[in-house]
Image: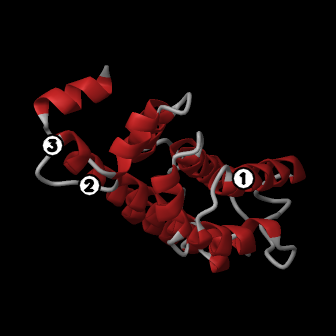
């Protein structure tokens, strides 16, 4: 139904505005980091961006190939301009997972947001959705995920900020993300990314 709405109206305004809100999360991450550095209270509440990312993620639920593709490319329904929301979410995820920040230990709020972002990426690839796998495989995102969450050299556990169970959960989600990336793909760029 949502796909039909965009196919009929050819309106990209929702995606344009979504891009703006998702990109605003980059500023929020920087603000949280500044507050932590200054030992100020950090706002860990959900933002419009995180709620929007979850909303768009649900479009792809159940291997909904049309919505998975629409999240990346609205030209397929005749929109004049296209806004790649997957690109924006992976940019937020890369900033959220800065290695220097990770080595300080992830807060519970950071873990929750990172899991949400990884879940989004998983949903837009599962099925598989090969164009999304190819796009994500071509970004620097995959190598960073492997390094940040799967290598022992990254010290994301910090007993003052999180628990071993939380870290096991985020590592499991990172593994699911890599599995979704490789699912059914014989695309060389995807295989090389992993």
Mark 1: few/some/many CA within 10 Å (<14, 14-19, 20+): some
Residue 46: give x, y in percent of width and height: 48, 41
Q: Is residue 19 above or below residue 98?
A: above
Examine the image and state in which quarter residue 126 appears.
top right
Q: Give the Cα distance between marks 1 and 3.
A: 32 Å
Examine the image and state in which quarter residue 11 appears.
top left
- Left or right of 156 on screen, residue 191: left
Q: What residue is shown at x 76% (from left), y 57% (from top)?
A: 161
Q: Is residue 102 above or below residue 121?
A: below
Label 1 sits on residue? 179
Going by the picture, which residue comes out furthest to the top? 1
Examine the image and state in which quarter residue 110 appears.
bottom right
Work out whether mark 1 precedes mark 3 in sequence or the reverse, and give the earlier one: 3
Q: Give the Cα distance between marks 2 and 1.
A: 26 Å
Q: Secondary structure at mark 1?
A: helix
- Left or right of 67 on screen, residue 121: right
Label 3 sits on residue? 78
Q: Nearer the viewer, mark 1 or mark 3?
A: 3
Q: Nearer the viewer, mark 2 or mark 1?
A: 1
Q: What residue is shown at x 22% (from left), y 54% (from top)?
A: 82
């Amino acid at each position: 139904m949502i796909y039909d709405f965009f196919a009929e109206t050819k309106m990209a305004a929702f995606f344009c505005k979504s891009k703006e809100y998702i990109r605003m999360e980059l500023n929020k991450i920087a603000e949280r980091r500044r507050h932590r550095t200054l030992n100020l209270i950090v706002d860990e509440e959900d933002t419009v961006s995180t709620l929007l990312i979850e909303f768009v993620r649900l479009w792809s639920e159940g291997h909904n190939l049309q919505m998975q593709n629409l999240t990346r490319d609205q030209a397929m329904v005749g929109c004049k301009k296209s806004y790649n929301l997957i690109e924006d979410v992976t940019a937020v995820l890369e900033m959220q997972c800065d290695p220097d920040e990770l080595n300080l230990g992830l807060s519970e709020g950071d873990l929750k947001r990172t899991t949400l972002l990884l879940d989004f990426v998983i949903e837009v690839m599962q099925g598989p959705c090969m164009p999304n796998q190819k796009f994500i495989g071509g970004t620097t995102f995959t190598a960073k995920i492997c390094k940040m969450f799967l290598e022992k050299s990254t010290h994301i556990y910090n007993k003052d900020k999180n628990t071993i169970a939380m870290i096991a959960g985020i590592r499991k989600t990172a593994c699911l993300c890599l599995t979704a990336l490789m699912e059914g793909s014989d695309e060389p760029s995807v295989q090389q990314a992993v």
